Image (spheres, rainbow, N blue to C red):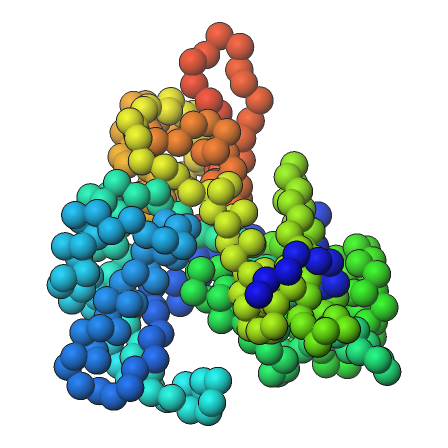
Amino acid sequence: MVVRLAFLTLVLLTLCGSPGRAAVVDWLYEVEVPVEDQSRSARRDATRTALLEMLTRMTGLVDVPLNDAVNGALSDPGRYFVQYRYEQRNGEHGPEPTLVVRFAPAAITRLIGAAKLPMWGANRPSVIAWLVTDGTDQREILGADSRHPVLLGLQAQARRRGFALVVPLMDLEDQLAVPAAAVYGSVSQILEEGSRRYAADLLLIARVRRDPGDRWALQWEFWMRDSERELVVVEDDPGRVGAAGADLVADELAARYVVYPGAAGVLKLQVLAVDSLRDYGSLMEYLDSLEFIDSVRVTEVGNASVLLDLVTATEWQQFIELLDLEGRLAPLPWATGTERYRMTWRRGSVND
């Protein structure tokens, strides 16, 4: 039975001035599913499960609607993946056979469009998790090598939901920079400074304890720029406690960055600081890689600037937030007497 109380506190903060930038999650299109054996029937069932998890990652929906397009895909999931392999992974009761399925990004994007589902782009913020256990004798920060069940539940569900979760090493450098008392007290200045080493975009803080009834309990406080949410949960299962936290993070990120299907419109955009043919090529390649832009039309090339018509279902404010994830295009003030939005191109990749 789930009881709503407050014993474990987690806070998600934007790292002000953090050097980190959201990036494409490199494992996003690779899904792991435990299997009993390597038989054809087990593989068929596992690839269906993997496809549903893939759709959850790319839509932000925990329960993917089983409409005609999705059911058609589930009847033949092989159309959507490019590779599978078997590996042994550590499960709850030791090593277990696992089917690893790698999906084709373009095929998944087409399926989401055909099913008229929302789309969450592959470029996502990373989250660093500082979790401190509040034991009877001492407090301890959970490091990357910890097997604490709350942390394992958080990590597993973060992967299922498709966001990058960073756990600090808790080596000597971390121990000197971030004492357990700073995590327990949510001392933002110390935590922000300690997190810079990992170049994460967001910060997650947790106080972990068990209540007198031997249940695992948590209270979430989730701050993300102009929004704040709180969630309080008590569970007998520590894995579910961690998973609930990952779900809250994923739901909040998806609510901000998911693009819902609808009538596409045209955003008229002027991009400045396009100073060379190389800049122009990099800009076009970048815009073409963004899932929330349907098409790009160049209407004019001027002196260090390009005028564009972008077909997209996003409104301007969400468009800015999505582009801010990577920081390659920065908005400029509205220019009087023009119908175009303005942005400046930032050379950010190793190829620019």
Q: Quadrant of residue 172?
A: bottom right
Residue at left offset 67%, top offset 71%: 216
Residue at left offset 85%, top offset 68%: 181
Image location (x, y in percent) of residue 158: 50, 64
| In this picture, residue 204 sits left or right of residue 289 | right
In which quadrant of the rendered image does the N terminus lie? bottom right
Q: Quadrant of residue 80?
A: bottom left
Residue at left offset 32%, top offset 52%: 64
Could you tell me if residue 10 is visible in this image? no
In this view, the residue farthest toward the top is 337
Between residue 282 and residue 216, name the one nearer to us.
Answer: 216
Q: Is residue 97 above or below residue 281?
A: below
Q: Is residue 93 above or below residue 40?
A: below
Between residue 282 and residue 246, name the one nearer to us.
Answer: 246
Q: Is residue 278 above or below residue 172?
A: above
Between residue 122 and residue 50, name the one nearer to us.
Answer: 50
| In this picture, residue 294 sits left or right of residue 208 | left
Image location (x, y in percent) of residue 233: 64, 59
Could you tell me if residue 8 is visible in this image? yes
In this view, the residue farthest toward the bottom is 94
Between residue 92 and residue 5, name the one nearer to us.
Answer: 5
Q: Is residue 280 above or below residue 14?
A: above
Image location (x, y in percent) of residue 202: 63, 54
Q: Quadrant of residue 77?
A: bottom left
